[in-house]
């Protein structure tokens, strides 16, 4: 009976059935559980995907965007003129700073800031929930270390320095100019964002500027870097200039001394290699230190040698004589008569500063006779004169790799007045830059072939060889014979003429002085009390290795002639530079005869008033042998032919003239000597 | 008719041998998987370690490059001509520059600058440092007044020196 009962129970609770039921129950539970988890996963990974991903990435990854170091500017001897060094910018996330006053107190002491101002700034930024508050920009490595050490708190788990909650460093770069003010107007400046603003920094910004590199750094919870990936950008290039730091320094010193001694407004100097067109030095005074840009005056930032236009005065006579030699109108040994030192062109009387008489062309240039230059210019004719101007490169940019170069002021012959050719023959009614004028002399030094002035020697890019910048094709300006004759005439200027103070110890030299009145924009006329004095020369005279241009603006103390003010600067520069370039001396020690009187140089284009000596001279010195013939509207007094149908004027007629004519005499040009800055 | 005697292998024995093989295979697979996992983990941690070292080295390279640049800048600064001149003056290796004097009058009174046959001397006129401010002594009475005071003073100085 009991057995039967047990069997029936067994039947009722079949073990397999029980196991299956239990199994299915567990499967159901697990299924629900997994379904729940799956639903949660779907929710997290679909609905909250973005937010959670961003959170995860921010916890393990730092993204740094930094600029590659800006390229370096070197001189021709690979000395750094401008380079970038590592700097650090400290900033705060004010939301994370618990106590702004305490943080400000610590930082102010370290960074020499005003604690109260800093605390107020942090507190305000925190109240406004700002995420960035700049504290100190571009501090050096030493300060960086000092701040990190002072703020170090080991209890703070932070991947980056400084270990202080809410403070961060941003790696930055700072531009430094190790040679301070040396060639500052040429090298230029860059702004706080390392973008070029002036000079080579601006013109070569595309080469020098470093691209932005994005670096992703993965780190563990302790801040240790476990992975890093960098998106490589293009490495910046370096620029090598043709300037020599050593020569530049000597030129700047000589120029500064001359400007200070003459109490002048400013000065410019250019040293060129005529055989290559390379600019070895380009100096301006006053100058500035780019490391202390805040202290610089706006006027000091201008590269006057390429941006300022001035009337060249007698230096420009080389164009008239050069054109005449090119047209074979005369030889340097031919004679020309300066008469009594006055010439009238289109009712405009031009005078020599001193009596010259009948001389050969070389002596006429040596003594800077206005009359002879005007006669020569008139013989050449305005079309040929203008063509020569253009071939020399006046009225156009030289092509030097510097920004804001001006083209100068050159009018087309259709716009010339009756006396324009005469004025231009002696360097008025025209505006040139110091670089243009030096380039013209370099053309003469290079046997009549004009080369584009260059200031960039090469550009170096990583994984590439040095790249030479493109330059314009050389231009034949004048025949080699004409250039050599002109050089011979210029040599005479230094030997016996107005440029005797440019004689160099051990080397022969050639050059031309220039002294021009400045234009007064207030009175709209030239101001006879203000000068631009210049000297542009070359050495050695027979085979020039350098051409040096010196321009002094408004010398006020001592002599004002180019021969007195600028020629000694040329001498000083050439005597230092030639041995440095390894040029062998070709002359004895210069022996300038100081017993001989200084030769005054023609300055202004005209002067209406005449001295008693002038009137005496007008009694007549017949033109003994003049190679120049009278041109239309030209009166060379005395002994020269008078223009037909034109009444002869009384010797002191100038005073009786109406105001308009008188004004015209002293204001032959109203537009020159503008300060032109182009961009 | 002789009967070939049947080989007597029990099912139990067959099952035991089969299960051993299965267990061996499973064991081997597990061993391979475990070894693979171990190897992968080692690789993973080695990679992390290398990355850490790499990061440290990169940082070091950056710091050294920064330091190199800083030293070059300091060297260039110290070797700059202006700095050398300053140091030389400080050490009295060269003298302080004297005030530059520009000669503003000729050593000799004027005479014709050119002695050609045709050149006529202009007697009694002294040549002074040429500027438009200075007229010849004979024409001094006709001089225009100069606008700039400094110019007037300067002219008087030059004229007095020329006398």
Image: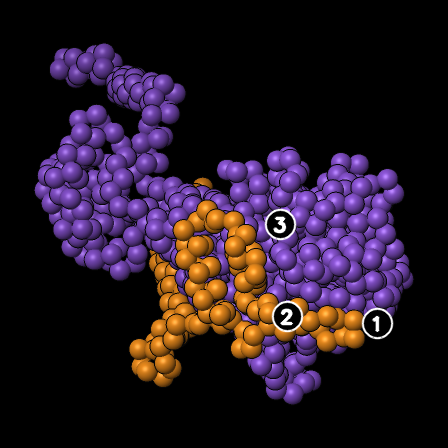
The chain letter of the purple chain reads A
Mark 3 → mark 2, Cα distance in angstroms: 20 Å
In this rendering, does residue B36 appear at all?
Answer: no
Q: Earlier in the sequence, mark 1 or mark 3?
A: 1
Left or right: A425 with respect to A654? right
Left or right of B120: which side holds A30?
A: left
Camera-near label (2 vs 1) is 2
The local secondary structure at tag 2 comes to loop
Instruction: Identify the residue at image location x=79%, y=75%.
Output: B117
Figure quadrant of residue A452: bottom right
Whether pointer 3 and pointer 2 mark residues with C-beta atoms closer than 8 Å, the reply is no
Q: State the residue lying farthest toward the bottom.
A: A588
* Colour-to-chain, orange: B
- Name the residue tied to disc 3: A609
Disc 3 crowd rating (10 Å Cα; few below 14, some 14-19, many 20+) is some
- The residue where tag 1 is placed is A333
Q: Quadrant of the N terminus of chain A?
A: top left
Q: Nearer the viewer, residue A360 or B83?
A: A360
Identify the residue position indicated by label 2 in the image: B123
Q: Nearer the viewer, residue A378 or A111?
A: A378
Of residues A586 and A209, the one nearer the viewer is: A586
Give how far apart the Cα atoms at labels 2 and 1 are: 28 Å
User: Helix, strand or loop at disc 1?
Assistant: loop
């Amino acid at each position: 009976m009991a057995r039967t009962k047990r069997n029936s129970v067994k039947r009722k609770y079949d073990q397999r059935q029980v196991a299956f039921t239990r199994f299915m129950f567990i499967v159901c539970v697990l299924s629900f559980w997994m379904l729940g988890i799956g639903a949660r996963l779907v929710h997290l990974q679909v609905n909250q995907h973005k937010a959670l991903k961003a959170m995860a990435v921010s916890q393990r990854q730092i993204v740094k965007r930094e600029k590659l170091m800006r390229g370096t500017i070197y001189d021709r001897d690979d000395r750094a003129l401008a380079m970038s060094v590592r700097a650090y910018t400290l900033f705060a996330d004010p939301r994370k700073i618990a106590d702004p006053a305490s943080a400000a107190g610590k930082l102010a002491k370290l960074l020499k800031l005003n604690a109260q101002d800093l605390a107020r700034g942090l507190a305000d930024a925190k109240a406004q929930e700002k995420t960035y508050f700049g504290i100190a920009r571009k501090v050096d490595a030493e300060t960086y270390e000092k701040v990190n050490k002072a703020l170090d708190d080991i209890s703070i788990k932070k991947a980056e320095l400084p270990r202080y909650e809410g403070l961060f460093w941003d790696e930055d770069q700072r531009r430094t100019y190790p040679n301070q003010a040396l060639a500052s107007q040429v090298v230029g400046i860059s702004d706080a964002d390392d973008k070029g603003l002036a000079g080579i920094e601006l013109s070569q910004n595309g080469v020098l500027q470093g691209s932005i590199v994005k670096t992703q750094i993965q780190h563990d919870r302790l801040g240790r870097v476990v992975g890093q990936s960098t998106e490589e950008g293009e490495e910046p290039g370096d620029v090598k200039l043709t300037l020599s730091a050593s020569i530049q320094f000597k030129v700047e010193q000589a120029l500064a001394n001359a400007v200070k001694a003459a109490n002048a407004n400013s000065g410019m100097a250019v040293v060129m290699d005529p055989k290559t067109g390379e600019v070895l030095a380009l100096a301006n005074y006053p100058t500035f230190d780019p490391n202390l840009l805040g202290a610089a005056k706006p006027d000091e930032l201008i590269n006057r040698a390429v941006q300022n236009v001035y009337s060249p005065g007698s230096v420009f006579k080389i164009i008239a004589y050069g054109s005449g030699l090119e047209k074979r109108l005369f030889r340097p040994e031919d004679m020309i008569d300066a008469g009594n030192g006055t010439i009238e062109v289109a009712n405009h009387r031009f005078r020599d500063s001193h009596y010259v008489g009948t001389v050969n062309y070389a002596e006429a240039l040596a003594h800077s006779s206005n009359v002879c230059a005007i006669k020569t210019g008139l013989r050449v004719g305005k079309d040929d004169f203008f063509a020569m101007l253009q071939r020399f490169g006046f009225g156009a940019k030289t092509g030097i790799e510097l920004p804001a170069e001006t083209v100068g002021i050159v009018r087309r012959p259709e716009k010339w007045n009756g006396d324009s050719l005469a004025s231009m023959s002696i360097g008025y009614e025209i505006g040139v830059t110091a670089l243009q004028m030096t380039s013209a002399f370099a053309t003469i030094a290079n046997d009549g072939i004009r080369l584009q002035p260059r200031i960039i020697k090469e550009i170096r890019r990583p994984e590439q060889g040095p790249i030479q910048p493109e330059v314009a094709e050389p231009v034949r300006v004048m025949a080699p014979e004409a250039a050599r004759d002109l050089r011979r005439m210029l040599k005479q200027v230094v030997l016996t003429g107005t440029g005797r103070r440019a004689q160099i110890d051990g080397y022969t030299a050639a050059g031309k002085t220039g002294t021009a009145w400045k234009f007064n924009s207030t009175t709209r006329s030239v101001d006879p009390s203000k000068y631009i004095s210049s000297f542009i020369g070359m050495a050695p005279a027979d085979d020039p290795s350098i051409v040096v241009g010196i321009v002094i603006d408004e010398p006020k103390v001592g002599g004002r002639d180019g021969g007195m003010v600028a020629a000694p600067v040329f001498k000083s520069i050439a005597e230092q530079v030639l041995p440095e370039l390894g040029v062998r001396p070709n002359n004895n020690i210069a022996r300038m005869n100081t017993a001989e009187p200084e030769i005054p140089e023609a300055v202004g284009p005209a002067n209406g008033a005449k001295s008693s000596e002038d009137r005496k001279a007008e009694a007549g010195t017949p033109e003994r042998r003049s190679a120049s013939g009278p041109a239309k509207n030209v009166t060379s007094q005395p002994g020269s032919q008078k223009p037909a149908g034109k009444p002869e004027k009384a010797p002191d007629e100038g005073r009786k003239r109406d105001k308009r004519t008188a004004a015209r005499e002293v204001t032959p040009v109203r537009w020159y000597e503008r300060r032109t800055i182009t961009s | 008719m002789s009967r070939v005697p049947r080989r007597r292998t029990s099912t139990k024995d067959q099952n035991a041998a089969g299960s051993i093989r299965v267990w061996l295979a499973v064991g081997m697979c597990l061993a391979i998987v475990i070894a693979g996992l171990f190897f992968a983990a080692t690789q993973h941690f080695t990679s992390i370690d290398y990355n850490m070292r790499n990061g440290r080295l990169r940082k070091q390279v950056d710091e050294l490059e920064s330091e190199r640049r800083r030293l070059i800048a300091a060297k260039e600064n110290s070797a700059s001509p202006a700095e050398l001149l300053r140091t030389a003056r400080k050490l009295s290796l060269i003298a302080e520059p004297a005030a530059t004097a520009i000669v503003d009058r000729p050593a000799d009174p004027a005479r014709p600058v050119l002695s050609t046959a045709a050149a006529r001397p202009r007697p009694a006129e002294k040549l002074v440092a040429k500027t438009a401010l200075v007229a010849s002594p004979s024409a001094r009475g006709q001089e225009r007044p100069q606008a700039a005071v400094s110019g007037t003073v300067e002219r008087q100085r030059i004229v007095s020196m020329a006398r």
